[in-house]
Amino acid sequence: MLEVKNITKEFPGVKALDDVSIQFHTGEIHALMGENGAGKSTLMKIITGIYKPDLGEILLDGKRIEIKNYKDSINYDISMVHQEIQVIPKATVAENIVLDKIEHFKKGLSVDWKKINETASEYLQMVELEVKPTDIIENMTAAQKQLIQIAKALSANAKYILLDEPTSSLTNYEAENLFRIVRKLKEQGCCIIFVSHKIEEVMDLCDCVSVLRDGRSMGTRRMSEITRQDMVKMMIGREENIHHMGFLDVKDEVVLEARHVGKAGMFDDMNLTLRKGEILGLYGLVGSGRTEFARLLAGADPMDTGEVFIGGKKAEIRSMVDAVYKYKLGYVTENRKEEGLILPFSVLDNMTLLTLSDLTNGVGKISEKKAREETEFMIDKFSIKTPEMETVIENLSGGNQQKVSIGKWLLAGCDILIIDEPTVGVDIGAKQQIHEIIWQLARDEGKSIILISSDMTEMITLARRIIVFKDFHINGEITGLNERVYEYGEVSSMLGAAMM
Amino acid sequence: MKGNGTIKKILGRNEIPVLLATILLCIVFSFASSNFLSAYNIYNVTRTAALYMFVALSQTMVMIVGGMNVSLGYTGALCVVACGYCMQELHWGSIPTVIFALLVGMACGLLNGLIITRLHINSFVATLATQFIFKGLVTGISEGFPYTQLQPNFTALGRNKLLGLPLMLFLAVIFLVIVWYMFRFTVLGRKLLATGGNAKAARMAAVNTDNMLLIANIFSGLFAAIAGICAVSMNGAAQPTTGSDWMIYSFAVSVIGGTALAGGVISPVGIFIAGIMIVLIKNGLVMMNANIYYEQTYLGLILLVAVSLGSFSIMAREFKRRRDFIKTQKTE
């Protein structure tokens, strides 16, 4: 039994964990749930020795243990599989599996490759992965890399395996396979700590669940004695409500039309229309081509064939510069931290990045006053919570970062917005606010929006027409959502069918 | 209250430790050597410092966009040779010579920029290669000999004074102010910074990042050329060996002055102070009769301390936070 007892951890200005106690038993799959920022990752990092707790202790089979670094945690048979899959891409499968204990694989002064490859294939069999130990990892799928990481944990004799959001980039089929392996490990006496925010998979897979909210433990419950509603309530502290947003005033005017768009190795002959005031959803799995297609429309990547018409006229979009400044088409990227924002810059600098040229006076001097006015306007409009506009954007919460990321395109006067996974890494409260913002942009301001999301609830809440992507082509289209109120279940089964 | 905030802001600036260190050095050296505060020495120190400021600006321009330029010393040398050749062999006047040298520097920068953006080669590798090209040209054209027959007025910049201080220092300050203004108040400056802050995000915000890299490299060449012209003017001759040690100093002054190696941050004030500090150290060691053969070792140690300051303060803050937190928990 691994037990954390009265763990408290404080970061400047925030108590990430507050007196948290949880027991993890072997032979069980134990879910650890909570919203973003609830403290799940911090707790995991404490268990694996990356952070030191300010107060509290960790007990292994009743004995107090001191985990000072990652190596210690491995010595106590604790292993973690990270969400951002950490592999060395240019190395072989076997090397990745044995890397943290490579000193045990020496023959004289050199490394015993034969032994390494034999050991690796043994553990690859345990996770039922059919790759050669000598294969290079680089081009493998996310699911394969995940299993390799689990094999790595097993090869370290791990009894406690922490899986951090393991299914976030897996297809349903791959996830099912992963669950099968996880169940097998449980039978073999491992304890799997399964960190996730997907309630359905947790209910299906786990034996018990511990919920964190705002750094506090909301308790541990057996899966048999808890309902989905209970779990949501534990996570967000109130009832979940999916309410119908209403209908959009979609005009007949087509603002964007893609005809026969193709790109070598990705798409051939993609067609799409977007009407004024519409929210068009692009639904599909991560990696089904939604983002890649959106990037072609936004000029982020060049298309090889086909034409795009904007406002009925043929558009020459050679770059994002053309897209924004000539055609008022903006793209809010899915990758907020790497592509959407310049993290070390202030809110002000991020917000005005697109509109710098409009802020200059006759001699090319940027007016700080104007820049502040613009930023102030957006901060008010979206109720962005920031101490001041000079605050470095890295220090804002995910939701507020996302609002800045959307706001800058509005300042640039964009009428067509492609918004890609707007609520990834955003907590439920901010998620609703962002949904409101997107809805109001379409309904009240007549913006035309293409929404990309793999979150079915989000898709059904906002989109009034949905195009389903699969393997880089359009697999189906769901219309009529703007004509009558559909039940959540009705739309979700239509989406399921369209993905077949 | 407001006044307090302003003072706090000024004291919190990154340049303050370097400034304090510089002042401290001045005090130590002025006690150690009576010649240190002589007008002649001050003139010399500030003049060399001005040269290093241009060299550092050359490096800073590319560091801003997250790159580097190891060829800047030989870019400068090529401009030096250009000056000498134009005046000695072609008998050009000073003005056309200066313009030509500036163009040579910018062309070198353009070449670097084109290699980096069009061939997608890492800036270190690209400029490592071009450094040899420039070096070869310098030796080939000059055959290793200095050009001494300059226009008589060419030394005005490097040898004249204003208010007892070298003209070059004023020129450096003017350029530092221009650079400060550019990065604070112009669209180009902001876009250059954005490119260095996060090139991907800048590209996704419709910044033509390739153009920004190109422009940054041209600026880098331009400042290397200015440094070269200053060197010729100071020395009264165009020495083809000029610039061989510039690369090291360019990094030292920029980094000590607070320009982020990762890009996205610039501090012209920091460059000014760090430029003076580096020269002070060199000069002070000579004055104190230290073994100058070890000069570079001292400089290296100081550079190391300067770049570690950030890490030290983070460690100290973390330590203090934990100690305070545990204290509050115990008293509860």
Image (cartoon, rainbow, N blue to C red):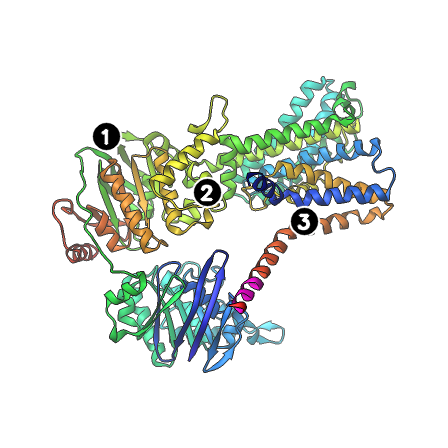
- Say the numbered circle drawn on residue B278: none
Circle 3: element type: helix
What count of labels does the image hold?
A: 3
> SS at mark 1?
loop
Q: Position of residue B10 (x, y in %)?
A: 61, 41
| Distance CA(mark 2)–CA(mark 1) | 42 Å
Which residue is the site of mark 1? Answer: A312
Identify which residue is drawn at 42% across, 68% down: A148
Is A85 on the left-hand or right-hand side of B260? left
Query: What chain is tagged by disc 3?
Result: B
The amino acid type of the residue labelled 1 equals: Gly
Mark 1 residue crowding within 10 angstroms, few (<14) / some (14–19) / many (20+): few
Chain ID, mark 2: A
In the rendered view, does B42 fall on the left or right side of A472?
Answer: right
Give the residue at mark 3: B306
Classed neighbour count for the residue bearing mark 2: other residues with Cα under 10 Å, few (<14), some (14–19), many (≥20): few
Q: Is residue A238 visible?
A: yes
Work out whether disc 2 and disc 3 sit on a shared chain.
no
Q: Which percent across, then down, holds residue B92?
A: 71, 18
- Name the foreground residue: B299 vs B246: B299
Amino acid type at image mark 3: Ala
Q: Secondary structure at mark 2?
A: loop
The magenta-colored residue range is B322-330
Q: Quadrant of residue B317?
A: bottom right
Queried whether the magenta region covers residue A417, the answer comes back as: no
User: Label 3 neighbourhood size at 10 Å, few (<14), some (14-19), many (20+)?
Assistant: some
Q: Gap in Å between the C-alphas at discs 3 and 1?
A: 59 Å
**Residue A32 in the image: x percent, y percent?**
36, 68
Comparing labels 2 and 3, the label whose residue is closer to the camera: 2
Q: Quadrant of residue A17?
A: bottom left
- Residue A388 is labelled as 2
Is A155 left, or right, of B173 in this rendering? left
